[in-house]
Amino acid sequence: MDHVAAPLSALTEMPEPQQVYAADGTRLATYTWGDPDAPVVVAVHGFASNARDNWVLTGWVRDLTHAGYRVLALDQRGHGLSEKPHEASAYGIRTLATDVESVMDTYLVDDAFYVGYSLGARVGWEVVRDLPHRIGRAVLGGVPDGVPLARLDLGQVRAFLADGTPVTDRTTQNYIALTERVSGNDLRSLLALAEGMRSSGTVDPDPTDAPARPILFATGSKDAIIEGSRALASAAPQGRFFEIPERNHFNAPGSRAFREAALDFFAEV
């Protein structure tokens, strides 16, 4: 029988989301792909993205499942089909890390690999440090070495939401464009997330308290945060660094070289 390639829609369709309740009662949309008995990779997306945009459309779920893994992903609070609080108090790096632990607990996942990008990588720094007995190794892509979203001009975003005042800061323009690109995003909840990162006392990753598990740090060669990410890799006891060729912060997740480096790293076990 001739092999018939799967239609493009089959490669990008999403399973029905399963709701998980976080410790504070926030509803989180979660998704799984692959053999239920296969080794698990927990995937956590970046700011203004979601599981589909970050991991399905870029080929990560396809490649991970083909390599024999089960993928467990979530829409972080404030994103995708998860609940979107508008209060800054609902967000904070510790809250986001605890959300990942709640998802793993609900799915009875005691041992997993972790892959996160941008905000999801910063959350992953916390998760791997907190749960070394449950996260065997991790890939942290585009991880900021400071407070996430610190370069976002919150005042300009508030003015834009209030009366449409044009945003002039280029970095903030890029984040707003990213927010508008992904269907279902709510700029007010993402503003609350950025405010929560700052008001909750979120601090820079502490190189003196880096996660001890093997970690592959990967950042685009055209990403402004590359040297900070490289420094975190040097600080981690079992860290290594992969420079994603010819990619910036926003298009790095789609890099085939990035996916291949991650798969090779996981396959070392």
Image (spheres, rainbow, N blue to C red):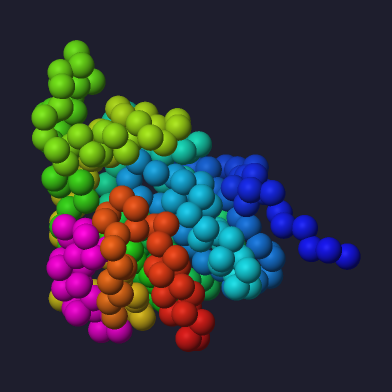
Q: Which residues are magenta?
A: 220-239
Q: Is residue 58 above or below residue 229?
A: above
Is residue 224 found inside the magenta-colored segment of the image? yes
Q: Does residue 87 show up?
A: yes
- Snapshot quadrant of residue 224: bottom left
Instruction: Name the residue furthest right.
Output: 1
Name the spot of residue 23 as percent of width and height, x first. Answer: 43, 47
Image position, residue 54 (x, y; %)? 44, 51
Q: Residue at x 19, y 13 (%)?
A: 163
Q: Quick check: 111 left or right of 129?
A: right
Q: Identify the image quadrant of the N terminus.
A: bottom right
Task: Residue at 39%, 44% (x, y): give it.
Answer: 49
User: Is residue 83 part of the magenta span, yes or no?
Assistant: no
Query: Residue at point 46% right, 73% down?
Result: 260
Q: Is residue 130 visible?
A: no
Residue closest to the far front: 2
- Where residue 208 appears, as percent x and y from the top left, is 15, 76
Task: Name which quarter of the figure residue 33 lies in.
Answer: bottom right
Residue 22 at x, y = what percent? 46, 46
Q: Residue at x 28, y 71 (%)?
A: 243
Seen in the picture, residue 123 relative to 79 is either above or below; the reply is below
200 left or right of 19 in image: left
